[in-house]
Amino acid sequence: MMASDEPTAEISCTVNGQPVRAHVPVRQSLVDFVRHGLGLTGSHVGCEHGVCGACHAVVDGRVVRGCLMLAVQVDGRTVTTIETDQPTAQMRALQDAFFERAALQCGFCTPGMILQASELLTRTAAPTRAEIRDALSGNYCRCTGYHAIVDAVETAAARLRDKAAA
Amino acid sequence: MPRASTRRLVAGRGRYVDDIPAKGEVYAAFLRSPHAHAAFEVVNISAAAAIPGVVRVLTAENIDPVCPPWKCVLRNAPDLQSPEQRPLARRQAVFQGEPIALVVAQSRAIAEDALELIEVEWSERPAAISLEAAAMPDAVPAHENLKSNICWRFEHRSGDPDKAFADAEHVVLRRLVFARKTGVPLEPRGILASYDPSTNGLIVHVSHQMPHQFQLHLAELLGMSPLDVRVICSDIGGAFGIKMHIYPEEVAVCAASRILGRPVKFIADRVESLSSDVHAREHIVEARMAVNTSGMITAIDVDDIQGLGAYSVYPRSSTAEAMSALRAVGGPYRFDNYHALLRSVLQNKVMTGQYRSVGHPVAAAITEALVEDAAAVRGEDSIVFRQRNFLPTEAMPWVSPMGARMIDLSHHACLERMLTLVDYPRLRQEIDTWRQEGRIVGLGLASFVEFTATGAEAYGRAHVPVSSLDGVMLTMEPTGEVRAQCSASEIGQGIQQGLAQIIADAVGVRADKVRVALGDTAASPHGGGAWSSRGAAITGEVAWTAGRKLRNELLNVAAAMLQTTATSLDLRDGRILAADTGAERIAIGDVARTVIFHPYDLPAGTNAQMSVSHTWGRDADPFLPTNGVQASLVEIDPISGLVRPLRHWVVEDCGRIINPLLVDEQIRGGVVQGIGEALYEICRYTEDGQYGSGTLADYLLPMAADMPDIVVAHVETPYSGSQLGAKGAGEAGTCGAPAAVLNAVNDALRPFGGRIDAMPISPVDVLRALGKLPAKAGA
Ligand code: FES
Ligand code: FES
């Protein structure tokens, strides 16, 4: 709910394939907009200052920190969140591998991790463990200690390569 | 076996508190003290209240009538003196960040706008900040009229330590300084409280580890019946002990909902979390170890000064951390003479409290540092020294000098396993080669005992209402599936999956046929929740017995239906079989359907029960000791002084393992928190009590790129006092990692003649130890 004199702006964008028109407070962050405006609560808020990566969303194909971007900045753009019903092959492979490898405990970091890792796998088909660790260093996980996450990303990458070769 | 429930989480369908809406909810923000210690008066709230969208501005004046203050009291420690604490401070603020007023508004942003317009008159007082200063007899008092900041003093002596030290061949001494750190669950604390005046009912969604404990305290503080307070802990985004306390903010939000008669939500932001979640591990420890001519440890003497912050945390006490440390000192070793002195000190900082592996990492670090020193003065490898001094298997059970019953431990076996795992002689050679190449590399070991799955006496004797019992109710569905309602809580550790597996095995069905509900006071009997690595050892044991009860019931009913005896039947994979031939007789779903829909088909007097329950808590063994060894290989950058962990190994004995996949990841996650403790994490305060670690840019967490792969192996010595034999595993990683890293860094520094005696290990201290920076003045 909004108070009457909160300055707002109208935006239109595409979110997870659906057209969206909304009045948003001009100071509202992208992550607050998708979470509270659209009910897409898969992007989480871990710090609100651009460090933890829990708030990731994809805007025009690039992973962004939803806490550092304003909702008004996605006017006219395409936003994808973890909830999309059309996940990329990378996302799907990562979701399976994270699940099987127990590469999550509380799961709070997981959507951000998967979106970030998915961007890595789109760029690099066969990343080394060190490259995976580097690519995920803007995503904090307080539960797993990262080892299982690195394993899961390796597994997803291998499966995607197998699929591409088949 | 992976956790079924994580399918939701990888899809972004988790439901953490902030994801749960309530119709008509409004949002809370707190005005907090900018001073470490000050008297204040809220002089004007009208400008704040006038902002459009503000629902109410509340101060202690408004909250006090609906909620009394609370105070940490331990009946078995009557000398513990901790001041009263309120949801909103009244006229005195005793740490920076203490909440003093609350704005409820249509959005959090508006609430924050309004905070700025609350007028407060402050009159600053001198503050007690540094642990050493606050502990002095003439220290500035942390609260007005406080005679001494020493909140609790404890001394323990067993055997004749003085004589042992006088007779010792060698005495080694260490002083280690541990800085405050905190747990940093990635999901901050949060609460949604919905009070319904028509029923006088309160429903609370909260990110908390023990719904029943929270329910009980809330009901008491708000003068309600627990029957009218329902606490639901849905998905929890990490907790680590941080979410087991009663915090002013959560209570204030419930009081606000009660005053307003509508749902109020508060989600801490990261700055609030880092500055108001409990901190932990602020200790200055001086310890000595006496060793006789045969190289046996004869005595240990520990002097621990512990920082508590402004209050001993409610309800479990902040002092529990230090007591836990003193209990665990010298854990793996047999020694008869012990002296321990503790002073727990009030300061104008946020409270310290139970955080993962409570106190044990402090104990392991000091013990294993002394072990290294003792081996060094004897001129032997510390491995030999450990092996000689370990409590041998044949000596168990053995009661330690602090009264802990040491049973079912495997020190020698774990160390053996570790030496094979790291390929010790080869690794030492490799390290020599690296050193010849100019690299600064070190290997550190740490053996440890961790006390887990705390039993009833620990808090019971203090009259703190903490349940060490758990309850499990099982219901047979007409489909042949099992519904379980348990008083444990899922905080990411995977207990929901573990319990499903245990129940499945006990009953004789597949794990995917068991659905486990947790974390809701309305859905399970009163019980302990998640703390002290208790899930597998306590709730698991209860679940096993409940499952066996349900199995027996099903076999009895089936026997009645089939006109045979229960002993001639077996139950496997959801089917009742003839015990001798294995031939299927009937599916349990058919048994359940007959009982539920066609009871007239059963022989008279069958009295079939399709739900059973069981409650249990261990009364023997107040704690279940577990043991393990960790090894850390580190490299130091000679230019920056940064320590890089290259490799980490763990050999753990947590008894019987229910789900190896999940246990290993608990250990790895714990190790990384321990590496964080050793190398990065610190809650800094300035001399006047300004908190300086309020963002994740200031409070450094371990990141993926800095962490090593972690090898985990097990020795399994089941707990002899239970059917399952499980012990706690969730905190073991954190217990031994700081000690191993500290020993590794000091091993790397040894050729340079330097040593580190403080955690986290700062690059500056490392450069000093390398002789690249001048030593600290006075050091
Ligand atoms: S919430 Fe955006 S980076 Fe942490
Ligand atoms: S799984 Fe909890 S923060 Fe990553």
Image (tube, coloured by chain):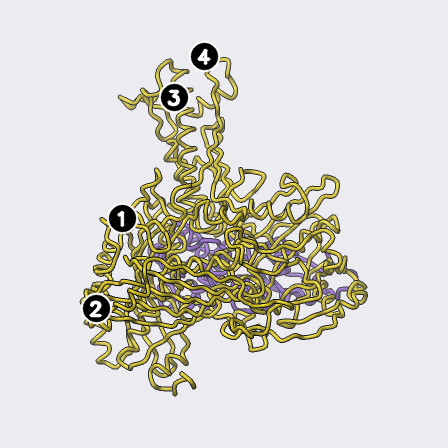
Q: Which residue is mark 2?
A: B381
Q: CA distance from mark 4 to mark 1?
A: 53 Å
Considering the image in quadrants, where does the N terminus of chain B appear? top left
CA–CA distance between discs 4 and 2? 73 Å
Name the colour assigned to chain A in the rendering: purple
Give the SS element for disc 1.
Answer: loop
- The Cα atoms of the two marked residues, 2 and 1, are separated by 26 Å
Q: Which mark is residue B396?
A: 1
Identify the amino acid type marked 2.
Asp
Helix, strand or loop at mark 3: strand
Residue B586 numbered tag: 3
**Which amino acid is tagged 3?**
Ile
The x, y position of residue B512, in whole percent, is: 42, 38
Q: Are marks 2 and 1 on the same chain?
A: yes
In this rendering, position of residue B402 left or right of residue B47? left
Q: Which residue is mark 4?
A: B603
